[in-house]
Amino acid sequence: MSRIAFLGLGNMGMPMAINLAKAGHEVIGFDIVPAARDAFEAHGNSAATIGEAVARAEFVVTMLPAGKHVREVYDVVLKQAKPSALLIDCSTIDVATAREVADMAAAEGFTMLDAPVSGGVGGAAAGTLTFMVGGPAPAFERAKPILEAMGKTIVHCGFVGAGQAAKICNNMILGISMIAVSEAFALADRLGLDHQKLFDVASKSSGQCWSLTNYCPAPGPVPNSPANRDWQPGFAAALMLKDLRLSQEAALASGAATKLGAEATNFYAELVQSGFGGKDFSYAYRFLADLDGNGE
Ligand code: NAD
């Protein structure tokens, strides 16, 4: 069993750290919010500073909001951790920052993996997250048993930053496909076509996709989709906007043509600006139906 510092005990980090502790690891948690540190005390030890948390840790896991927080925290980690510690950043951040931070770590003699996740808060609690990992193969092998205590599917995507690249490419597909399915249901409403009938046809035809069959944005056809609980998240529209913006930064930096990715980013920005950032991202359907003057 290993000694693991876990930095960032938020919606995702708290259940992930708890699963590590349940697997028998010695987990020392830290968050800038004292209440989060106190809450973790029921499951492991909490530390009052980052330095205290990482001092004797063999692994340092971070689960922070964005790239700037990761950079801030790493400024301290790289000064205070043991150089033999393996650094694993599970936050969703931009590819450029992930590579920069890994270079900073390497300059101080550390190895770092980027290991963002999909599966949301439910997956974090159930220990069924998917990890997309970038970094050297030996470090991946060393991290795998730790990641397996928090997730079900662990994929080595390649070089440092490849985990973040996989995450934003996947979520760009998801953002675009959710809008496509939502537009189809909003059009069906206008044409007087029943939700269930469109679902019965499209789910067995070439329009089939995850956004339709697992997460239908219109109420009715998929009983456990957020559409049936007033679009409570799930995966909030504001988080989808964050990931789409990361995809567009990466597209700009690499010269990739992502026209629908750009449209999807603008669409979710409008949805968030209209006050629906806290709704599930499948609120796209309700938003489109309302814009048409055809809301429910
Ligand atoms: P969150 O805001 O709930 O948690 C982040 C935590 O980091 C907070 O508790 C905050 O106090 C802490 N923090 C901020 N700055 C810190 C610092 N300098 N030192 C220590 N702690 C600090 O966010 P979350 O929902 O847990 O998401 C974390 C990451 O996971 C994000 O990058 C997000 O994009 C990604 N993610 C979230 C979901 C989801 O459904 N929530 C799904 C997949 C990926």
Image: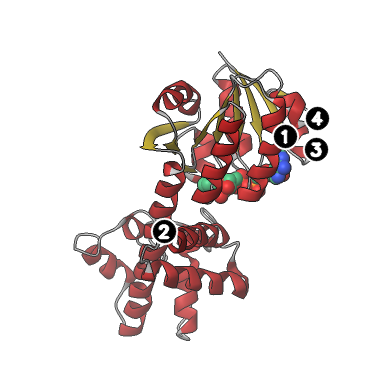
Residue 294 versus residue 153 in the image, above or below: below
Local packing at callout 2 (Cα closer than 10 Å; few below 14, some 14-19, many 20+) is: few
Residue corresponding to mark 2: 254
Mark 2 and mark 1 in contact (Cβ < 8 Å)? no
Residue 270 percent across, percent down from the top left: 55, 74
Residue 167 versus residue 131 in the image, above or below: below
Query: Mark 4 or 2 closer to N-term?
Result: 4
> Whole-Å distance between the Cαs marked 2 and 3?
40 Å
Q: Nearer the viewer, mark 2 or mark 3?
A: 2
Residue 248 versus residue 86 in the image, above or below: below
> Whole-Å distance between the Cαs marked 1 and 3?
18 Å
Q: Label for residue 48?
A: 4
Local packing at callout 3 (Cα closer than 10 Å; few below 14, some 14-19, many 20+) is: few
Q: Amino acid at mark 4?
A: Ala
Q: Amino acid at mark 2?
A: Ser
Residue 202 percent across, percent down from the top left: 24, 65
Disc 3 secondary structure class: helix
Residue corresponding to mark 1: 76
Task: List the single residue furthest toward the front.
Answer: 107
> Whole-Å distance between the Cαs marked 1 and 4?
14 Å
Pick the front one: 20 or 250: 250
Mark 3 and mark 4 in contact (Cβ < 8 Å)? no
Q: Nearer the viewer, mark 1 or mark 2?
A: 2
Disc 1 secondary structure class: helix
Residue corresponding to mark 3: 34
Indicate the quadrant where residue 200 lies.
bottom left
Task: List the single residue furthest toward the bottom.
Answer: 293
Q: Amino acid at mark 3?
A: Pro
Query: Mark 1 or 3 closer to N-term?
Result: 3
Residue at the location (51% across, 59% down)? 240
Local packing at callout 4 (Cα closer than 10 Å; few below 14, some 14-19, many 20+) is: few
The number of numbered discs placed on residues in the rendered structure image is 4
